Image (cartoon, grey):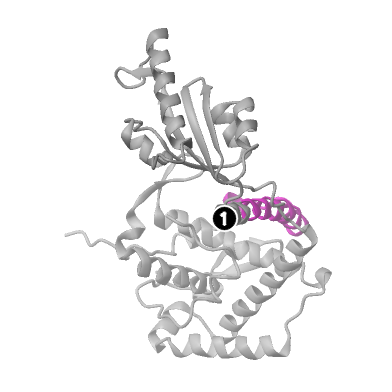
């Protein structure tokens, strides 16, 4: 289950949506008077939260159906919560991040261009045109508020980009290199029951070695059509497979000495028969640098490093704006509970 996207993407991708089916239950006050939470001295009212909430509701229900909200998951602390509760917490964090980054706009020299203002105006008008009079009355959403939310998201996105430019988070090709080999594997133990491994006798180990040597000789014999994958089938090596890993992963899997031998091969080379703590192996180098896997790993590593870098910077910016901000202190529980996604059950 994916959590909601990083701020700056949610509203920009939302399009026009209807707010029907998620109405506040307020007896005396309008949504533009109900404070859901504060950041510094700035209050965030219920009608603004509804814009974010309904965008997320539409996205989740489109992908997972209307029953998603009552599904129970474990949160980061190992506690069980419904998707509705987790998502509502995420929405508060989403808005909080936008407010913090908008607060830093001037220090980064960030402002909206005329083209951006025009585009945002069109988006706000499209959003409002998708609402009924009843929607507007129930939620308190105005075109001015929608315009503000779109503007803040655009500014926050631009500030985020500046932060990441300054951080210059990059991963070298060598750091993320992924190497693909085929491991033709002859084990020197038997598994007798789950998790119970029994070592072969010395005579049995010698037989395994002789079999592996025979397979290697045939693989290297130009007149023999046996290739390493076919050998796995012919010699019953059912645990043989392709592996695509980093150098450190190969060290962890096979040990330093064997990993260095593997990385001494060129594409197409065959290494064997070599021994690890698990048995005998014949390796064939498929790609010392698997281009696709390396690119995927680079993107994965850079995404994680960027996330860590932004989290550090954001924490400092939040302290500047509200040094003591806490969900339990700043969020009004009663107002927060007015945000509902799951349909209410009617007791008979």
> Could you tell me which residue is drawn at 50 percent across and 74 percent down?
51
> Could you tell me which residue is drawn at 46 percent across and 57 percent down?
2
* Quadrant for the C terminus in the image: bottom left
Number of numbered discs overlaid on the protein picture? 1
Indicate the secondary structure of the residue bearing disc 1. helix
- Residue 228 point in image, percent of width and height: 43, 39
* Quadrant for the N terminus in the image: bottom left
Of 264 and 223, the residue lying toward us: 223
Q: Is residue 84 above or below residue 137?
A: above
Q: Which residues are magenta?
A: 301-329
> Could you tell me which residue is drawn at 43 percent across and 80 percent down?
17
Q: Is residue 253 magenta?
A: no
Residue 24 in view in this figure: no
Q: Is residue 240 above or below residue 317?
A: above
Q: Is residue 8 left or right of residue 282?
A: right
- Residue 149 point in image, percent of width and height: 60, 77
Q: Residue furthest top?
A: 202
- Residue 79 point in image, percent of width and height: 44, 41
Of 294 and 279, the residue lying toward us: 279
Residue 294 in view in this figure: yes
Q: Residue furthest front?
A: 223
Q: Quadrant of residue 314?
A: bottom right
Mark 1 residue crowding within 10 angstroms, few (<14) / some (14–19) / many (20+): some
- Residue 18 point in image, percent of width and height: 40, 80
Q: Is residue 324 magenta?
A: yes
Q: Quadrant of residue 259?
A: top right
Q: Quadrant of residue 322?
A: bottom right
- Disc 1 marks which residue? 296
Of 12 and 203, the residue lying toward us: 203
């Amino acid at each position: 289950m994916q959590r909601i996207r990083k701020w700056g993407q949610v509203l920009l991708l939302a399009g026009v949506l209807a707010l029907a089916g998620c109405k506040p239950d307020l007896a005396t006050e309008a949504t533009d008077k109900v404070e859901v939470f504060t950041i510094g001295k700035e209050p965030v009212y219920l009608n603004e939260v509804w814009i974010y909430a309904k965008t997320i509701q539409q996205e989740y229900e489109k992908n997972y159906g209307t029953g998603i909200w009552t599904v129970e998951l474990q949160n980061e602390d190992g506690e069980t919560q419904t998707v509705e509760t987790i998502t509502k917490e995420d929405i508060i964090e989403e808005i909080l991040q936008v407010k913090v980054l908008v607060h830093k706009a001037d220090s980064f020299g960030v402002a909206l261009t005329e083209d951006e203002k025009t585009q945002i105006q069109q988006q706000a008008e499209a959003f409002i045109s998708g609402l009924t009079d009843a929607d507007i009355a129930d939620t308190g959403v105005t075109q001015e508020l929608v315009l503000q939310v779109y503007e803040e998201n655009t500014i926050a996105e631009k500030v985020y980009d500046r932060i990441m430019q300054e951080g210059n988070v990059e991963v070298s090709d060598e750091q993320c290199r992924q190497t693909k080999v085929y491991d033709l594997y002859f084990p020197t133990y038997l598994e007798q029951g789950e998790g119970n491994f029994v070592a072969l006798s010395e005579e049995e180990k010698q037989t395994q070695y002789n079999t592996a040597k025979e397979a290697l000789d045939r693989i290297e014999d130009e007149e023999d059509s046996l290739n390493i994958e076919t050998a796995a089938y012919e010699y019953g090596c059912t645990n043989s497979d392709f592996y695509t890993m980093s150098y450190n992963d190969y060290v962890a899997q096979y040990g330093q000495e064997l990993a260095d031998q593997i990385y001494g091969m060129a594409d197409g080379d065959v290494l064997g028969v070599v021994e690890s703590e698990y048995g005998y192996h014949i390796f064939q180098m498929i790609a010392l640098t698997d281009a696709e896997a390396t690119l995927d790993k680079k993107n994965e590593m850079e995404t994680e490093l960027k996330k860590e870098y932004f989290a550090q910077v954001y924490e400092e910016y939040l302290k500047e704006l509200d040094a003591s901000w806490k969900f339990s202190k700043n969020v009004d529980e009663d107002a927060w509970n007015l945000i509902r996604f799951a349909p209410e059950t009617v007791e008979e």
